[in-house]
Amino acid sequence: MQNRPTLDQRRFARRLRASQTDCEQMLRQRLRARQVAGLKFRRQVPIPPFVLDFYCVELRLAVELDGGQHYEEAGEVHDRRRTLYLQRLGIEVVRFSNLEVIRQMGDVLEQIVRIAEDLRSRS
């Protein structure tokens, strides 16, 4: 069973929401107000011990954006461990690079829709 976020984790998530990256802001503009497949995404959601960039509670779908640090060896190892942990909690994780968000936003959104449709068909 997953733990509830601590006060410090909630405060950290709040700080992340207040200081989003440009790519997070770009994707947020497209995900907000149920614009994509009617899904409600929350941003910077604490799922201890992690904070997810975007999370759809209804489908248990996490959307993570990866900047340059994620492509270094330590970042890749951390991301693999994090993804495995979240999958064990029943959370589907999809990752996009910042470059994909900047250059291929339409493709990113289409992939999110396809994954959402697949998750809906399973339930």
Image: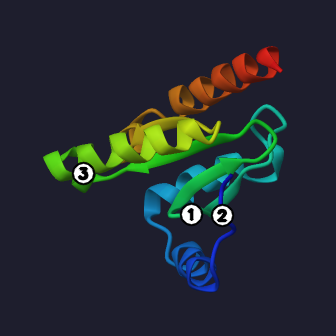
SS at circle 3: helix
SS at circle 1: loop
* Marks 3 and 1, how far apart at CA: 18 Å
Looking at the image, which is closer to me, 2 or 114? 2
Label 1 is placed on what type of residue?
Answer: Pro
Label 2 is placed on what type of residue?
Answer: Asn
- The residue under label 3 is 75
The quadrant of the image that shows the C terminus is top right
- The residue under label 2 is 3
Mark linked to residue 48:
1
Count the labels in the image.
3
Pick whichever of labels 1 and 2 is earlier in the sequence: 2
Pick whichever of labels 3 and 1 is earlier in the sequence: 1
Label 3 is placed on what type of residue?
Answer: Gly
- Nearer the observer, disc 3 or disc 1? 1
Is residue 102 at all visible to an observer of this figure?
A: yes
SS at circle 2: loop
**Residue at 44% of width from left, 65% of height from top?**
21
Horizontal side of 69 relative to 8 (left or right) equals left
Residue 61 quadrant: top right
**Residue at 60% of width from left, 84% of height from top?**
11
State the image coordinates of residue 39 (x, y, percent, origin top left). 80, 40
Is residue 101 at all visible to an observer of this figure?
A: no
